[in-house]
C-alpha cells in the first residue's frame, strides 16, 4: 500500500521539468513580440515614417506580393545558386588544402605559411581586386563566397587533424592498422568535430560574402531586389530581403547542427 | 637460462636516454613463451619505456630488443576509438573477413557480449578496460604487453580484472609482460617479478606459489619484494 502511494506520488515530480520547459519557451518570446508590436505602433502613429522603415504589416504585405508575383522566388533562386557554387568551390579548396597540410609534413611546411598569411587579409577587402580580375558578372561573387568559405574550413580541418590524440595513433600502430587505416579510423574521425565548427563558420561567412558581393552591380538576386527597392524608397521590400537573408543563414546553421547530431552521435551518453 | 625454445622476448644491453637523462641503463631480459613476468618499480624507473620499446613504438635505442612473434598491448587508458562501436574497436586492424564474429567471441571471453554495439564512451572504466583486453587478445599475440592496465580502476574492479587476466592468460598462454607498481598485483599474477630501479633490473623474484593465489599466501614474499623497492614494512607492522 505504501509502495503504491510512493509510485503515484513520484509521478508529478517527473512531470515538473517538462512543465517548466513548456513555460520557458513562450516566456522568451515576450520581448521580441513586444518589440514588433512597438514597431507597428510607432509606424501607425506616424512616429516612424515609411521612408525610414516600413511597418511590420506593410512588410508582411510586401512579402506576400513578392511571393505572389514570383519576384522573391526568382531572386531567392539566383542568390542560393551563387552561394551553392561559391561554397562548393571554396569548400573543395579548403578541404583539399587542409587534408594535404594536415596529413603530410611537407604539405604543412609548404602550404600552411602562405595560407596563414592570406587568412589575415579581410577577404571582403578583396572586392576591388576581384572586380579587376573577374569583371562584374557572376565570377567575382562566386570568388568572394569561395574565399570566405575556404579559410575557415582549412583552418579548422587542419587544427582538427593536428589535435588527434597521439595515444590513439600509437595504439593503432601496435594493433596492426595500416597507415591508410590509421588515417581513416583514427585521424580523420578525430578531426570531424572541429571541422564541423569550421563548416558552421564557413556558412556564416558564405552568406555575409554573398550579401556584400550582391551590392556590386547585381542584376538579379536578393541583393538586386534590395538595391532596386532602395531607389524607389521601398523600405518594406528592403526589410523583406533582409529577413530572407536571415532565414537562409538560420536554415544552413540548423542543417549543420542536424548533421552534427547525426555524425557525432558517439558522443551522446 | 638454457632453453630449447626460442624466447618470446630477448633484450640485451638495452640503453635509452632522453637527452641527458638515462632511462634504461643496460637491461638484459629473456621471457619464455607463456611466461608471466611483472616489471615492478616506482614511477620514472623506466618500466613503461621498456614496454614501449618492446611494442615497437620507440626505435631509437642502444642495444638489442627482439620480439620475434606478434605483439599486442593494453594501456593504462583503454585508448578505444570513441567513434567506432565496441565490436569494431576489436576487429579493426585484424584484417580478417569475419571480424564481427571474432569480436563477439572475444567479447564473450570478457563477458561484454551485450555491449558489442555500444559506443565506447558509454562504457564504465572497467568495461572499457575489458574491451581493451579483448582487443589485445583477439590478435592471438605471442607477447602481451600490459602497461599498468588496472592503474586507473577502482579497487573492486581491479580485483575482478586480476582474475580475468589470469583466466585469459591460462587460456591463450601468451608471454605476458605486466608493468605495475602494485606489489600485490605482481605477486598474485606473475611467475617472475623483476624489480626496476633507475633503468636497471635490481632484483628478480621467482614466484612459485600455486594458482589461483590468494592474498594471504603471498604475504611472506611481499615483504622481501618490498624491501627491494626500498620499502620497509617490518617497521610499519
Image (cartoon, rainbow, N blue to C red):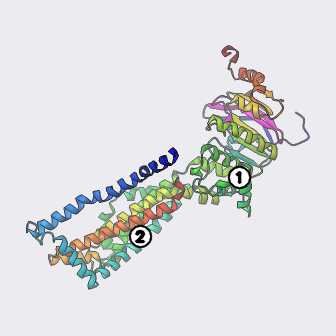
Residue B207 is left or right of residue A172, and the answer is right
Check the picture and name the quadrant holding the C terminus of chain B. top right
* Residue of label 2: A87
Quadrant of res A209: bottom left
Within 10 Å of disc 1 (Cα), the crowding (few <14, some 14-19, many 20+) is many
* Residue of label 1: B107
Mark 2 to mark 1 CA distance (whole Å): 45 Å
The magenta stretch is B19-48
- Tell me residue A149's x, y (percent): 40, 65
- Tell me residue A51's x, y (percent): 12, 72
List the single residue furthest toward the top. Answer: B235
List the single residue furthest toward the bottom. Answer: A69
* Residue B40 among magenta residues: yes
Asked if marks 2 and 1 fall on the same chain, the answer is: no
Comparing B124 with A173, the one in front is B124
Residue B145 in view here: yes
Tell me the chain of label 1.
B
List the single residue furthest toward the front. Answer: A1
* Residue B140 among magenta residues: no
Check residue A157 in the rendering and tell me which mark sits there, or answer none.
none
Residue A11 is left or right of residue B14, and the answer is left
Residue at the (67%, 33%) spot, across then down: B46
Tell me the chain of label 2.
A
Amino acid at each position: 500500500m505504501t509502495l503504491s502511494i510512493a509510485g503515484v506520488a513520484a509521478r508529478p515530480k517527473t512531470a515538473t521539468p517538462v512543465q517548466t520547459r513548456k513555460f520557458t519557451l513562450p516566456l522568451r518570446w515576450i520581448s521580441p513580440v513586444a518589440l514588433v508590436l512597438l514597431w507597428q505602433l510607432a509606424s501607425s502613429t506616424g512616429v516612424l515614417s515609411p521612408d525610414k522603415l516600413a511597418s511590420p504589416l506593410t512588410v508582411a504585405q510586401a512579402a506576400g506580393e513578392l511571393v505572389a508575383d514570383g519576384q522573391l522566388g526568382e531572386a531567392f533562386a539566383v542568390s542560393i545558386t551563387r552561394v551553392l557554387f561559391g561554397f562548393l568551390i571554396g569548400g573543395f579548396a579548403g578541404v583539399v588544402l587542409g587534408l594535404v597540410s594536415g596529413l603530410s609534413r611537407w604539405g604543412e611546411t609548404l602550404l600552411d605559411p602562405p595560407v596563414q598569411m592570406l587568412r589575415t587579409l579581410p577577404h571582403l577587402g578583396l572586392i576591388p581586386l576581384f572586380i579587376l580580375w573577374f569583371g562584374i558578372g557572376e565570377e567575382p561573387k562566386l570568388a568572394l563566397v569561395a574565399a570566405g568559405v575556404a579559410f575557415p574550413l582549412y583552418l579548422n580541418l587542419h587544427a582538427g587533424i593536428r589535435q588527434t590524440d597521439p595515444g590513439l595513433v600509437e595504439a593503432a600502430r601496435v594493433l596492426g592498422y595500416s597507415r591508410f587505416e590509421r588515417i581513416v579510423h583514427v585521424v580523420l574521425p578525430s578531426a570531424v568535430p572541429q571541422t564541423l565548427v569550421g563548416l558552421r563558420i564557413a556558412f556564416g561567412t558564405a552568406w555575409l560574402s554573398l550579401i556584400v558581393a550582391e551590392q556590386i552591380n547585381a542584376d538579379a538576386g536578393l541583393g538586386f531586389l534590395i538595391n532596386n527597392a532602395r531607389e524607389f524608397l521601398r523600405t518594406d521590400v528592403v526589410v523583406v530581403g533582409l529577413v530572407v537573408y536571415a532565414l537562409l543563414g538560420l536554415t544552413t546553421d540548423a542543417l549543420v547542427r542536424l548533421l552534427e547530431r547525426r555524425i557525432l552521435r558517439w558522443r551522446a551518453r | 637460462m638454457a632453453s630449447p625454445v626460442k624466447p618470446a622476448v630477448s633484450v640485451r644491453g638495452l640503453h635509452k636516454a632522453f637527452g641527458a637523462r638515462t632511462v634504461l641503463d643496460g637491461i638484459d631480459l629473456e621471457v619464455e613463451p607463456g611466461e608471466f613476468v611483472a616489471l615492478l618499480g616506482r614511477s620514472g624507473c623506466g618500466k613503461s619505456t621498456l614496454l614501449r620499446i618492446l611494442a615497437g613504438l620507440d626505435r631509437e635505442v642502444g642495444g638489442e630488443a627482439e620480439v620475434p612473434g606478434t605483439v599486442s598491448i593494453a594501456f593504462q587508458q583503454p585508448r578505444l576509438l570513441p567513434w567506432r562501436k565496441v565490436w569494431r574497436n576489436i576487429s579493426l586492424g585484424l584484417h580478417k573477413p569475419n571480424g564481427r564474429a571474432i569480436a563477439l567471441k572475444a567479447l564473450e571471453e570478457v563477458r561484454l557480449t551485450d555491449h558489442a554495439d555500444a559506443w565506447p564512451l558509454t562504457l564504465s572504466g572497467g568495461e572499457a578496460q575489458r574491451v581493451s583486453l579483448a582487443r589485445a587478445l583477439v590478435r592471438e599475440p605471442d607477447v602481451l604487453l600490459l602497461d599498468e592496465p588496472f592503474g586507473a580502476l577502482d579497487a573492486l574492479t581491479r580485483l575482478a580484472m586480476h582474475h580475468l587476466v589470469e583466466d585469459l592468460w591460462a587460456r591463450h598462454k601468451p608471454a605476458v609482460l605486466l608493468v605495475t607498481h602494485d606489489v600485490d598485483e605482481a605477486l598474485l599474477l606473475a611467475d617472475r617479478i623483476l624489480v626496476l630501479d633507475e633503468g636497471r633490473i635490481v632484483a628478480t623474484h621467482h614466484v612459485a606459489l600455486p594458482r589461483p593465489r590468494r592474498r594471504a599466501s603471498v604475504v611472506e614474499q611481499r615483504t622481501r619484494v618490498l624491501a627491494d623497492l626500498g620499502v620497509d614494512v617490518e617497521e610499519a607492522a
